[in-house]
Image: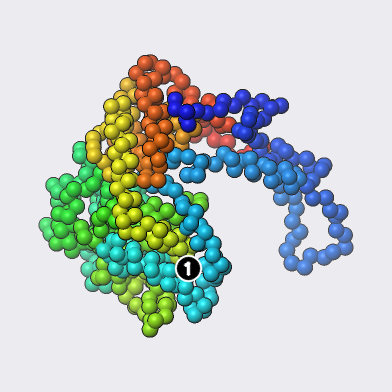
Amino acid sequence: MSADAKVIEMTATENNPARGLIYEENLLWEKDRSDTPGVDLPASEGLASRTGVKARGDIGLPQVSEPQALRHFVKMSTWNYSIDHGFFPLGSCTMKHNPRLNEKLARLPGFAHIHPKQPASTVQGAFKVMHELQNWLGELTALPGICLAPAAGAHGELAGIMTIKRAHEQKGDTRRKIILTPDSSHGTNPATAVMCGYQVRSIPTKEEGRLSVESFKEALYATSEDGSDIAGMMVTKPNTCGLFETNIQELADLLHEAGGYFYCDGANFNALVGKVRPGDFGVDVMHINLHKTFSTPHGGGGPGSGPICCTEELAQYMPVPTVIEDNGDFRLEWEEDRPTTLGRLKGFQGQFGMHVRALAYMYSHGSDGLKQVSEDAVLSANYVLSELSDDYYAPYGGPCMHEAMITDKNQKEAGVTTLDIAKGLCENGYHPMTVYFPLVLPGTMLIEPTETESKDAIDGFITVMKNFAKDVRDGDVEKFHNYPTSTPRRRLDEVKAARNPVLRWK
């Protein structure tokens, strides 16, 4: 075990609920002392309700003091694992460092204290930031039509497919009912297509991990000789196995010949930014996760932002608003400015704080820095793959792109599964990688180190993973079934929990 992977063993008891700085914490209701509540006020008498609503009875909140409530939540907050705690190797998620410079700029009064209903003349600086971000996203993707409004990646997918649907409808082409997706695609891709009223046709990729021209043609022409029932395809580039789709240009040409549009899931754009522009290999519309590529906070630290980028042809159909420059001033473009738009998908103009952070990241890196971002991300992933491919099964070999995929095939023969390995990482102080995804193979582990991790940090993770493999080879496997043993919460009996869930605390 490497030095930075050691953990503190906790032996909490009822009388000694914490060991060192690792806290155990009971439920707030277990601290309840109804005879000594945190707020002790005399009952009001002779006062009539002025709300017209029946007086509220006991709502069941625990009666604790303010310090008790504060300490309870602060202690629990120390259990949260984040990118600021340590290595976060979630594949397909791009958990990268959020530079504090971005946060400083987003907190400037002129950005943090404005309101979306202010007159346009009072927020010209904010509009200029959005306009600049639109320009740079267009430059980096070779797709000039930009809408910043979508609130997250899945929302961006929805905006992209709705844009494609709007384009077909405006052309009067209503016979196109099918969206093509690889079997390795993000689950949101087929879900989005169905939400937009399309049928989904899956394209197999299991053998090579990539789309082949033969399998694509078979799907494209399955129910029509010319592909005239195909509305478009949704492809992640690089794909969810961490591989570069080598046939993508030919596939895009075949799709366009059939009259379909190419939607690119931009979740993995961090592997291409500054190096390859999606518009140059045939993409018609894509979304970009600002948190994955341009370092805005991820998940609960959000809110999210999933702008879409379109060709000039599709830009007339994408959602409103966008920021336009009009005689030297900036303003929002709405339906009356662009009647062909599919309309609004979100209130106001999107998550403005994320726009500031993303543009700050672009400016601080410059074109050469963004290019190095993708190069370093790909280098880190290939380093992980090369170091672990002798110990774990690497189905597609190398090189990979920004994430490395391995499986538990070698360990499973000895009774150790991907889940056991993930729990072992928890025991050793690491957040597990993405497990059991993509679904194209059993027992997958998807590892994405990103460009922000040092070699020392990656080496610590690799050391723990190699030690796991050695333990399995040596027959020391029983401990894997009990991991984690040093965390405040132990391993769950998942079968029992599923069959007899405890849904209410008593």
Circle 1: element type: loop
Task: Give the residue at x 21% y 44%.
Answer: 210
Front position in the image: 320 or 312: 312
Front position in the image: 331 or 236: 331
Which quadrant of the view contains residue 432? Answer: top left
Q: Residue furthest top?
A: 475
Task: Give the residue at x 42% y 32%.
Answer: 460
Task: Give the residue at x 33% y 48%.
Answer: 186
In the rendered view, tell whether residue 340 sits above or below residue 257: below
Q: How is the image coloured?
A: rainbow
Quarter of the figure that contains the N terminus: top left
Q: Residue 314: x percent and y percent?
A: 27, 68
Q: Is residue 346 left or right of residue 167?
A: right
Q: Is residue 97 left or right of residue 341?
A: right
Q: Residue 127: x percent and y percent?
A: 44, 72
Amino acid type at mark 1:
Gly
Residue 468 in view of the camera: yes
Quarter of the figure that contains the C terminus: top right
Q: Residue 496: x percent and y percent?
A: 51, 29
Q: Residue 343: x percent and y percent?
A: 38, 71
Q: Which residue is under mark 1?
A: 347
Residue 165 in view of the camera: no
In the rendered view, tell whether residue 249 sits above or below residue 169: above
Task: Give the residue at x 43% y 69%.
Answer: 129
Number of callouts in the render? Answer: 1
Q: Residues within 10 Å of mark 1 (few under 14, many from 20)?
A: few
Q: Residue furthest left?
A: 225
